Image (cartoon, rainbow, N blue to C red):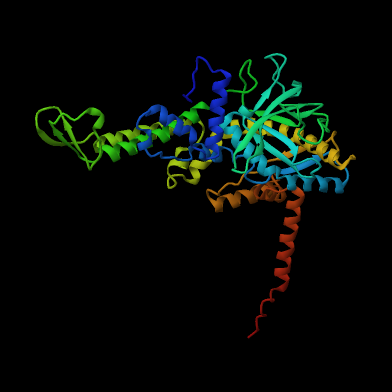
Amino acid sequence: MLSVSYENLDESTFDEQSQALEKFHNRDYSPALTELKKMFPQSWKNIQLRTMPFIYSVARELGGALYSVEPSRAFDGVQLPEIEAAIRRMYEDTGITQTMRHAHEVLCIQSGVALLCLPDTAGSSRISVHVLAPWRVKPERESPLVKDDRSIKKWRVRLPRRETIYGTIHEEDLILTDETITWADGSPLYETEENPIGMVPLITIRAGERCGSFWPAVNSDLLDAQIALILSYSDLGAIIHAQGWGQRVLTGGGMDASEIQVGPDTVLNLEENHDFKIVSGADNNTVKGFIESTESFLRLVLSQNKVDPSALMSSGAYTAASRIVERADRMQEKLIHQKAFERAENRLFGILSRWTNAIRGFSVLPTGGVNVRIEYHEFTQPFDPLHESQASQIRAESGLESIVEQIAKERGISKDEARQVLEENLEIQRRIRANQDPPAALEVV
């Protein structure tokens, strides 16, 4: 079973759960089909699987807190404007913001995520950042007490290696050390075994800790809710379809039990006394109770994960006020994730710079002495636009927050870019006033 065993959460169970969460996040519902076969070994083929993207929706809802709006990045320590421009082009070409948003989604549902930075092919100038679920990344530690990934010298990473002409993907372990990058069979990933950047190009982000284990426990509550949701409604659909019809029963005739066929177009012949009646195994109260029990369970799981159930279960009731309250509830966890991603982005910059220098063959970007300072922005729907506009004006006049800071926060841009936007807007206003016709002079009567 995929459901967690709290007495023995061994490595195989952890990998199975993490892999199942990864599949559900990618809207692959094969783990639910596996559970359906266990639940109904004989009749699973007659039950239509009713799939729904619960994990995907929760990941999108929780994982949008940091990178939904482009954050402002300042590279402290970079002196030359042309170097900073090259760094920003590298970030844009690599799609760092989109990758980090996906990584945040994975972190929210897995409690851990890894970033692997590799060139696409040998000699390629394009560097890809791969987002990996915890089950794919295995550190080889000298002791269970080692928890800092910088202290680990060897990693085993499960990656796709080749694709057949039929579209089947074969996966193998990639072995990463400071000196070499090879596949598990010893063959190099690129032309040689050498690791040209001299460090493992891997970053891990963890939302918690588990004593003795490198990765924290996966969010098995979300996994159980996803499986329960699919199986409950698949089972309910089968019940309504098979038993909602009045089943015709004819007693007498001695039909063997293995020959009995259930359905609205069949007649059951049972026992010896001849009698004909219509029976039904489910009524409206049974179906209603089934649905209420399932939805009540989902609401509890969502609320414990700081998600307003109205956001996923009812679009009409999800008001601006409820979103404000929900953001306040998530603030503590958001701050924890923010610190983790700030550290990850600083390490990511160093790895990207090293790969760029190795590909070019000479030092192009700095690999040390640079601090990536990030300012996150979040789009907020105005609850009361008029009063919020007045509050914004008061904050600017009192000196609590400048107009430039407000523009930067609202649009998700840097302060320099916000200052340019403000100057352009003021210039447009000056031109409009200059082009207005002066008021007609009053004639003295």
Could you say which is closer to the camera, residue 335 or residue 148? 148
Furthest-bottom residue in this view: 445
At 49% from the left and 35% from the top, the residue drawn is 30
Figure check: 12 above or below 183: above
At 67% from the left and 41% from the top, the residue drawn is 99
Q: Is residue 130 visible?
A: yes
In the visual, does 325 lie left or right of 348? left
Could you say which is closer to the camera, residue 372 or residue 124? 124
At 27% from the left and 34% from the top, the residue drawn is 286
User: How far across and down, in percent of the image, does residue 51 sit?
Assistant: 44, 40
Q: Is residue 66 visible?
A: no
User: How far across and down, in percent of the image, does residue 159 sit?
Assistant: 66, 33
In the visual, does 342 lie left or right of 217? right
Q: Locate residue 237: give its quadrant.
A: top left
Furthest-right residue in this view: 362
User: How far across and down, in percent of the image, does residue 115 sit?
Assistant: 69, 34
Could you say which is closer to the camera, residue 444 or residue 27? 27
In the visual, does 316 lie left or right of 27? left
Check the picture and name the quadrant holding the C terminus. Answer: bottom right
Q: Locate residue 252: give its quadrant.
A: top left
Q: Locate residue 238: give its quadrant.
A: top left
Figure check: 320 above or below 149: below
- Count of number-bearing discs: 0
User: How far across and down, in percent of the image, does residue 444 sit?
Assistant: 65, 84
Figure check: 438 above or below 178: below
Figure check: 281 above or below 417: above
Could you say which is closer to the camera, residue 29 or residue 356? 29
